[in-house]
Amino acid sequence: MARARRGLLDGAARGVQGARRAQAEEAGVSSAADAVTVALDVAVPPEVAFDVFTRELDAWWGRGPRFRFVPPHAGTLTLEPGVGGRLVHVPDGHPERAFVVGHVETWQPPRVLAFTWRLASFRPGQLTRVEVRFDPAEGGTRVSVTHSGWDTVPAAHPARHDLTGRAFVVWKGRWWADLLTAARDHIERSHHAAAGKDTR
């Protein structure tokens, strides 16, 4: 558990994760008016972190209704490289229901990736943006995700769970923290395996 939270930056926040959380707990997130930022350290060089993060995205991205975009919440998630590339979720057995989550706006390996982000339930004008930075750090790379544009999505929308202010920041921060932890573990394992030092 300590490893799962190691490296999350910008201090600690206290909040409630929806109605299911009866007590406050720490979450290493930071926020602007419409954005959530989460980061952690990965023990590989930036070029490796960027490559595995983008090329093997489906291998580390969470499964099930919490993380997949189209029912039955299984299938393949692909990020097409380069500006204009798509982030696409194709449900198992239902290629006709492929959903384009967003498009790549910035592709600057090995340092910056940015793409638009929407859910199928978003209305026109409701669009968020994800920026991922891969900055050199002692022992490897600091991977930071900033998810902005949430001011376009009302609190009553299911994507926000009726949360506003700090409560929303903490909830969404935990969501990204769980994803980044999975990404870190996969990137490091993939790198060690490629080097003949698989730690599984």
Image (tube, grey):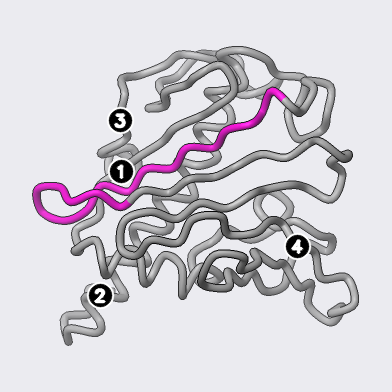
First in sequence: mark 2 or mark 1?
1
In the picture, the quarter occupied by the N terminus is top left
Q: What SS does tag 4 mark?
A: strand
Q: Which residue is mark 3?
A: 9
Amino acid, disc 1? Leu
Range shown magenta: 134-151
Q: What SS does tag 2 mark?
A: helix
Q: Residue at x 87, y 44 (%)?
A: 121
Q: Is residue 66 left or right of residue 188?
A: right
Determine whether label 1 and label 3 are within 8 Å by CB.
Answer: yes
How much space separates mark 4 and mark 1, taking CA atoms? 27 Å
Q: Which residue is mark 1?
A: 40
Q: Which residue is mark 2?
A: 191
Q: What SS does tag 3 mark?
A: loop
How much space separates mark 2 and mark 4, taking CA atoms? 29 Å
Nearer-the-camera pick, 184 or 198? 184
Q: Which residue is mark 4?
A: 100
Q: Nearer the viewer, mark 2 or mark 4?
A: 4
Q: Is residue 69 above or below residue 97?
A: above
Q: What SS does tag 1 mark?
A: strand
